[in-house]
Image: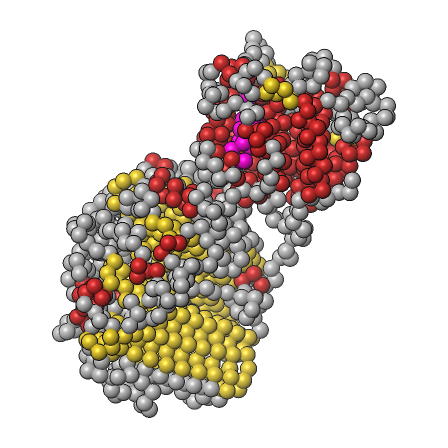
């Protein structure tokens, strides 16, 4: 009945709902804008360097960071710097020169200060290299007039006399980055192939913020980029001026954003591809915008398979698009345009026969389609070559200024000074691949999040438990700094745990992460690489150049020597992940150039030997309504699926790329894992192997380019020519609406797209080269479901909080000093001490101060309760406090948790002591759990009553303990306590009776049935906490809580006219103060209201019924209690009495004392937070 996702370590709801510190403990203010002066060097030039490569044989002497000027480069525009630059790259026996194809142990970050660097031969970045220029003053790489080579920067060198062989296998040419340069070829003769980049790369590569200046002599042969092969990849923020070709590019797949091309003969030339996604391309003053080689329908005749082009502009260019073939009736190269603007274009799309199929002029093309179009479950394609009207894209996915789909390339912090960064190594992390850095790294985040950029020096950081990255963090790796998870915490697939957890459930704010790799060791079947909870405004929350790599590298234990593809190694020993990247139910954000890779080969094996690295799931977008952008992402070789989008809305995916595991179908999925319904795992009867893409129960999902590939059956490629490596590869269920897929390219799958149980898109109808290409598919229902109603956010009411303070001051008059432990308690004359209710009143004070962000009672409260170190288990004070009265113990635990919340809000490091003490009280009570009466804990040491109050409290305390530093056992106690209450508790309709009596002799269990209000509030509060504990997705828990709340306000036994009452509130005398009950009955109404507030603290995050709906439906009831307390319960002297439901002068008898005062205060505080400022 409870969704049992074992989500690790969600912290208190207070962190995201109440006014709790949003900065690290060492912060005096938020980081704000950068403090670097305009003339200061870029921070990368002067920051302290601690980076190492711990698995390099020469760890102590190997340099990760290199400044080219330290190797003799002058940057004066006169000296030939070629040798110096290449020396900086090659230093340290690195991977290149045709003798090494890949390695993770020889990384190099090569920095170029501002200047002009003359080169006469290519710069040859070896494997695992980043070339980075000064962002503030981009260095120029100027090709000399006598330059000799294929390109100024050549990423895959052709071996002379090698018959076309190169240093690296193009599709495996991973882990490269070039950013912040100007490249100038204008000194080279115009009749030679002066080229900026030879960019033949694979995944985990980026080309960012580069301008290439080319010859503008008529008929010149210069080109900005030459790319003839590979399996990329991402590039953005580029500009090209001049040349025969701005970009001459071909690759299996690529994502290209924000490129400006001017004054070229051809802006973009495409010889071949399987599928590219272009976005925000601006072409001006060129002869042809896009020139595409088309018409090939077989692997041997491969040409351009498909281009998706979005949000782009072509200006003063005679021909916007040109294809080499004519395809008026059938597919011969797919083209999809959306929001493409023409300004001064003569011809729109000229085909091989010279006919313009689109028309020129000045206009905006909403959509243009050239290719096969499908809809719903229809299996017959409609070949289309025409303009169309596209769907309305949700505003949440758009740039509000331009109404284009939002994008933001990686932050580079150009305005920040080195003093605004904090090094994790300077703070105690080793990064040596063997020291456990968990505590050191977490301490850095806890101290500096929000006010410093947290800097991971190059290295491998071993962690044995989850690292929590708080919302408001900024995180930068020096150069793909690696976090390596290992140990028992990550070993249990039944209890999955993230390596990095980003934010807390329901957080909104800002967070940026770039240049990291997350990986695991063998046996990590329970590891989730990255789990993301934070959402925020577009661009405020994101991740750039961050990769999850499972196996295939030194340190992981999943290499060719341990897990060879040809061996008989147990799959269990080679399991590396439960899930790669999890966008959880409250998460959202912008994710660019993220590769989630279960390695198919060993990067550190000289022969690049194939391996079996088992990872259950790839990328999971999990029941989130928050917008998600997947930009240039890839997910490969995971056992169940590569991408799964379930129960989510507002998802943009711009070129996603997948590969099915090479070992499948031996074994068939889900082996060697299990498919779990709690994780919305799909079935495999229609796929036969892992799904490339699953979309279920979702809406407003937009896929702009997808390459889903299946090359093998148990490592044999015999299935490729017959296109039956697997049955199906993409699945959209019938329940999803407003799902649009543009540019779907598949290899090896008989069915390209399955809808529900229907095989809709057959590869045989869409042959377009080695791949099959479908241009458009839209769901049968293209209208997303209407959004649920939205209710205003709650606004705390200062005037009502002021009323609360007046009554708190009155309650303080009941405080007396206690001889026990030099503390005190609340007393009520004549000698009616309620020492054991003091805890709930102190909790009320903290609840008030957290709600008002004030310190009104700070001095008092600090001396009003036992220090956790003093009142520890087994001490006299402990025994005097509790004496096996387990409900009294649990009320005290709640107080200590609130103390901890308060201390945390004050940035006091001792808050964890209070949390620990609260957990120790939980453990004290947990020892009484028994199977008698089906489970549950006992009320007292008599062990004869499992009443609702102690078990309701145990539910609340368990959930709070879990969120305040407790391990999974606390959440598990919350789960099983609710199960016990649900199946064995004292139900009275939708209300809860007093508990279950246990006869120790006969073992008989009998319900009591008496109704008390505090039991109802505890059930609601506990269910809210459990909802939060288990990921914020199981709304049935909230529904169950609301049944109890609604019944409480409606049932005549617990209310009168919607105002709370106890059965003892009726009659001429108030029996709530009678012998045996006094003073307990006086506080129950207030406890219900306090826990109703706690319930709403959790439940308000649920948007399934409309934003704030879970809160809005109780505004009037909360206001009614406030009004009753003020107008009925308060006497002429300003004291609050026990009777709320009728005037104190009425037939009932109201009692006025400290108990009734405190109870009324709880109702007032609830109204101040959630009662919509009711009039007094």
Using the image, determine if residue 897 lies above or below residue 478: above
Q: Viewer-proximal residue, 989 or 1143?
A: 1143
Using the image, determine if residue 146 lies above or below residue 653: below
Q: Position of residue 490 (x, y in %)?
A: 36, 39
Q: Is residue 351 inside the magenta stretch? A: no
Q: Give the main secondary structure, helix, strand or loop, of the magenta stretch.
A: helix
Task: Please tell me which residue is depicted at 14% across the width and 74% down the height of the picture.
Answer: 160
Count of number-bearing discs: 0
Q: Position of residue 117 (x, y in %)?
A: 25, 74
Task: Note whether residue 1038 is visible.
Answer: no
Task: Please tell me which residue is depicted at 78% across the width and 42% down the height of the picture.
Answer: 1175
Q: Is residue 899 inside the magenta stretch? A: yes
Task: Please tell me which residue is depicted at 28% across the width and 72% down the height of the picture.
Answer: 115
Task: Please tell me which residue is depicted at 22% across the width and 71% down the height of the picture.
Answer: 74
Residue 130 located left or right of residue 420: left
> What's the magenta region?
889-902
Residue 99 located left or right of residue 797: left
- The residue at the far bottom in this view is 218
Q: Viewer-proximal residue, 998 or 905?
A: 905
Quadrant assignment for the N terminus: top right
Quadrant assignment for the C terminus: top right
Q: Position of residue 921 (x, y in %)?
A: 50, 23
């Amino acid at each position: 009945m409870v969704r049992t996702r074992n989500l690790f370590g969600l912290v208190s709801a207070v962190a995201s709902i109440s006014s709790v510190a949003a900065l690290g403990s060492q912060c005096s203010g938020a980081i704000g804008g950068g403090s670097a002066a305009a003339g200061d060097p870029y921070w990368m030039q002067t920051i302290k360097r601690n980076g190492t490569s711990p698995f390099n044989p020469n760890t102590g002497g190997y340099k990760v960071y290199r400044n080219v000027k330290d190797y003799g480069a002058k940057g004066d525009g006169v000296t030939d710097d070629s040798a110096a630059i290449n020396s900086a790259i090659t230093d340290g026996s690195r991977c290149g020169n045709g003798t090494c194809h890949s390695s993770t142990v020889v990384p190099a970050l090569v920095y170029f200060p501002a200047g002009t660097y003359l080169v006469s031969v290519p710069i040859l970045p070896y494997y695992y290299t980043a070339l980075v220029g000064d962002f503030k003053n981009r260095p120029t790489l100027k090709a000399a007039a006598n330059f000799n080579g294929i390109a100024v920067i050549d990423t895959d060198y052709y071996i002379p006399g090698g018959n076309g062989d190169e240093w690296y296998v193009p599709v495996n040419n991973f882990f490269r980055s070039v950013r912040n340069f100007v490249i100038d070829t204008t000194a080279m003769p115009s009749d030679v192939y002066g080229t900026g980049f030879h960019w033949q790369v694979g995944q985990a590569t980026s080309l960012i913020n580069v301008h290439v200046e080319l010859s503008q002599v008529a008929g010149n042969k210069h080109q900005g980029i030459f790319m003839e092969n590979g399996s990329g990849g991402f590039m953005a923020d580029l500009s090209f001026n001049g040349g025969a070709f701005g970009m001459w590019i071909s690759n299996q797949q690529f994502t290209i954003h924000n490129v400006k091309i001017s004054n070229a003969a051809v802006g973009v030339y495409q010889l071949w591809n399987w599928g590219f996604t272009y976005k925000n391309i601006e072409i001006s003053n060129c002869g042809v915008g896009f020139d595409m080689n088309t018409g090939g329908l077989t692997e041997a005749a491969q040409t351009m398979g498909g281009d998706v082009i979005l949000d782009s502009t072509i200006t003063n260019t005679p021909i916007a698009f040109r294809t080499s073939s004519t395809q008026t009736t059938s597919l011969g190269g797919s083209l999809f345009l959306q929001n493409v603007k023409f300004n001064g274009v003569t011809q729109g799309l000229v085909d091989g026969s010279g006919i313009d199929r689109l028309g020129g002029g000045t206009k905006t093309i909403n959509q243009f389609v050239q290719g096969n179009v499908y809809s719903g479950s229809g299996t017959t394609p409609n070949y289309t070559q025409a303009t169309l009207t596209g769907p309305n894209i949700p505003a949440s996915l758009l740039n509000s200024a331009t109404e284009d789909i939002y994008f933001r390339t990686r932050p580079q912090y150009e305005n920040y000074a080195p003093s605004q960064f904090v090094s994790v190594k300077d703070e105690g992390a080793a990064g040596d691949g063997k020291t456990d850095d968990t505590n050191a790294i977490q301490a850095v985040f806890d101290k500096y999040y929000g006010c410093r950029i947290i800097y991971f020096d190059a290295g491998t950081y071993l962690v044995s438990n989850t690292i929590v990255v708080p919302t408001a963090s900024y995180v930068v790796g020096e150069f793909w700094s690696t976090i390596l998870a290992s140990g028992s915490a990550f070993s249990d697939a039944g209890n999955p745990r993230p390596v990095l957890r980003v934010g807390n459930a329901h957080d909104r704010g800002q967070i940026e992460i770039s240049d990291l790799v997350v990986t695991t060791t063998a046996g990590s079947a329970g590891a989730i690489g990255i789990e993301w909870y934070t959402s925020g405004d577009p661009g405020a929350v994101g991740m750039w150049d961050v990769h999850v790599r499972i196996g295939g590298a030194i340190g992981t234990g999943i290499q060719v020597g341990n897990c060879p593809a040809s061996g008989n190694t147990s799959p269990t020993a080679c399991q590396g992940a439960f899930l790669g990247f999890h966008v959880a139910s409250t998460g959202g954000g912008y994710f660019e150039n993220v590769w989630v890779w279960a390695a198919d080969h060993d990067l550190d094996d000289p022969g690049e030997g194939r391996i079996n690295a088992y990872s259950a799931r790839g990328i999971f977008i999990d029941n989130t309504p928050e917008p998600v952008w997947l930009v240039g992402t890839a997910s490969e070789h995971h056992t169940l699926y590569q991408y799964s989008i379930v129960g989510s809305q507002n998802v943009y995916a711009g070129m996603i790329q997948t590969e099915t595991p090479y070992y499948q179908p031996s074994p068939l999925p889900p082996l060697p894992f299990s498919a779990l319904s709690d994780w919305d795992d799909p079935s495999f009867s229609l796929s036969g192997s892992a799904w490339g893409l699953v979309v279920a129960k979702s809406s407003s999902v937009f896929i702009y380019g997808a390459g889903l590939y299946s090359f093998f059956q148990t490592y044999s490629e015999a299935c490729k020519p017959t296109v039956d490596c697997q049955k199906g590869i993409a699945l959209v269920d019938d329940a999803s609406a407003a799902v649009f897929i543009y540019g779907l390219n598949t290899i090896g799958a008989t069915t390209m797209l399955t809808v529900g149980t229907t095989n809709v898109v057959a590869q045989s109808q869409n042959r377009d080269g080695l791949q099959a290409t479908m241009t458009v598919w839209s769901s049968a229902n293209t209208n997303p479901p209407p959004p649920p109603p939205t209710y205003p956010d709650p606004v705390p009411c200062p005037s009502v909080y002021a009323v609360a303070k007046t009554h708190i001051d009155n309650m303080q008059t009941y405080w007396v000093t206690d001889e026990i432990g030099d503390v005190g308690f609340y007393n009520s004359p004549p000698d009616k001490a309620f020492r054991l209710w003091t805890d709930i009143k102190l909790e009320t004070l903290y609840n008030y101060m957290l709600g008002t962000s004030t310190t009104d009672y700070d001095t008092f409260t600090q001396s009003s309760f036992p220090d956790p170190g003093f009142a520890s288990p087994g001490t006299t004070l402990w025994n005097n406090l509790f004496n096996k009265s387990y409900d009294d113990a649990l009320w005290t635990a709640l107080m200590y948790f609130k103390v901890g919340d308060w201390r945390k809000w004050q940035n006091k490091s001792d808050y964890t002591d209070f949390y620990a003490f609260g957990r120790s009280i939980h453990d004290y009570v947990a020892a009484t759990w028994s199977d008698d009466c089906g489970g549950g804990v006992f009320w007292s040491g008599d062990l004869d009553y499992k009443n609702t109050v102690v078990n309701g409290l145990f539910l609340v305390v368990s959930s709070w303990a879990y969120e305040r530093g407790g391990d999974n056992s606390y959440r598990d106690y919350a789960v099983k306590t609710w199960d016990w209450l649900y199946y064995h508790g004292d139900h009275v309709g939708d209300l809860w009776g007093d508990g279950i009596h246990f006869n120790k002799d006969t073992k008989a269990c009998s319900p009591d049935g008496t109704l008390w209000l505090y039991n109802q509030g505890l059930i609601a509060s506990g269910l809210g906490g459990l909802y939060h504990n288990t990921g914020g997705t199981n709304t049935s828990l909230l529904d169950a809580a609301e049944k109890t709340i609604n019944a409480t306000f409606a049932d005549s036994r617990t209310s009168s006219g919607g105002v709370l009452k106890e059965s003892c509130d009726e009659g001429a005398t108030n029996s709530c103060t009678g012998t045996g009950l006094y003073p307990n009955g006086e506080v129950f109404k207030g406890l219900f209201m306090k826990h109703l507030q706690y319930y709403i603290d959790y439940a308000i995050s649920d948007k399934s019924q409309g934003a704030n709906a879970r809160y809005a439906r109780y505004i009037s009831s909360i206001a009614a209690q406030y009004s009753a307390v003020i107008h009925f319960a308060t006497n002429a002297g300003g004291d609050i009495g026990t009777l709320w439901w009728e005037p104190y002068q009425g037939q009932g008898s109201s009692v006025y004392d400290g108990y009734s005062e405190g109870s009324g205060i709880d109702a007032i505080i609830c109204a101040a937070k959630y009662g919509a400022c009711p009039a007094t």
